[in-house]
Amino acid sequence: MDQSMTTIPAVPPQAGLRAAGIVQGTGPEVLHRIGTRGIGAAIWQRDWPQVLGAGLAALPAANLPELRETVRLEGVGPCLREACAAAGLVEEPLRAALIADVTALAQMFAAIAGAQRLHLRLQAIRTNACSRFHVDNLRLRMLCTYRGAGTEFALGAPRSDPQAPVADAPAGAVVLMRGTRWPGDEEPGVLHRSPPIAGSGQTRLLLVIDPGDDPEPHWH
């Protein structure tokens, strides 16, 4: 295994929860290990452009771009430009950096998932959206938190224990997770949730990418 990669057993092995490991690394190649037996999630702990982290953190919440579209890969950039314009995000190089980063992640996801079309969501979150631990009802999902607290992963048995320990993917990290429609004989065993932020005054900015050939997702 590459020295930059580590594997975390996210959930103890159980019947029906066999793909329960999380692999993480400092290079994008770690995302390709999502198909490795026993791996339910892969996390790219990347160094991302400072202009994105600092710029989006300082941006008024009203200017955070949002979109929900099903597009071909070549449509990602135009959709993002429209979303930025609608939100009044005109500051350069922040606008250009966000569009370039989301487009690059969409290209990576399309290559790994073998998807010609993508369900693309960029959402500003101010409430406890999707705060229960769960597995998504789709084949594969990519997440990247651009602002605020990152996605949390269960390290125990959260369905029965709300105090089960969790780990989180920090802002900027790219997460790839199997869902219940993943093909093969392994069921996904990595449970995740959005961090509870209601009443905190925080506004998260979350990117979600799903295969466009999966059923239309229930947007949270």
Image (cartoon, rainbow, N blue to C red):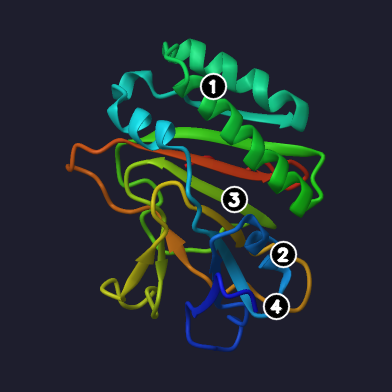
Q: Position of residue 160 (x, y in %)?
A: 35, 78
Kind of residue sitting beneath label 4: Glu
Mark 1, other Cα within 10 Å: few <14 / some 14–19 / many ≥20: some
Q: Residue at x 74, y 41 (%)?
A: 212
Residue 91 shown left or right of residue 207 in the figure: left
**Secondary structure state at the residue bearing disc 1:** helix
Establish if 65 lies above or below 26.
above
Query: For the residues marked 4 and 3, what is the alpha-carbon distance in whole angstroms?
Result: 19 Å
The mark nearer the N terminus, 1 or 2, is: 1
Residue at numbered disc 4: 186
Residue at numbered disc 3: 142
Residue at numbered disc 2: 182
Query: For the residues marked 1 and 4, what is the alpha-carbon distance in whole angstroms?
Result: 40 Å
Residues tagged 1 and 3 counted as in contact (Cβ below 8 A): no
Residues tagged 2 and 4 counted as in contact (Cβ below 8 A): yes
Residues tagged 4 and 3 counted as in contact (Cβ below 8 A): no
Question: What number of labels is visible?
Answer: 4
Q: Position of residue 57 (x, y in %)?
A: 31, 33
Kind of residue sitting beneath label 3: Met
Query: For the residues marked 1 and 3, what is the alpha-carbon distance in whole angstroms?
Result: 21 Å
21 and 33: which is toward the camera: 33
The mark nearer the N terminus, 1 or 3, is: 1
Kind of residue sitting beneath label 2: Trp
Mark 3, other Cα within 10 Å: few <14 / some 14–19 / many ≥20: many
Q: Residue at x 72, y 24 (%)?
A: 75
Residue at numbered disc 1: 96
Nearest-to-viewer mark from 4 and 3: 3
Tell me the quarter of the image containing the N terminus. bottom right
**Secondary structure state at the residue bearing disc 2:** loop
**Secondary structure state at the residue bearing disc 4:** loop
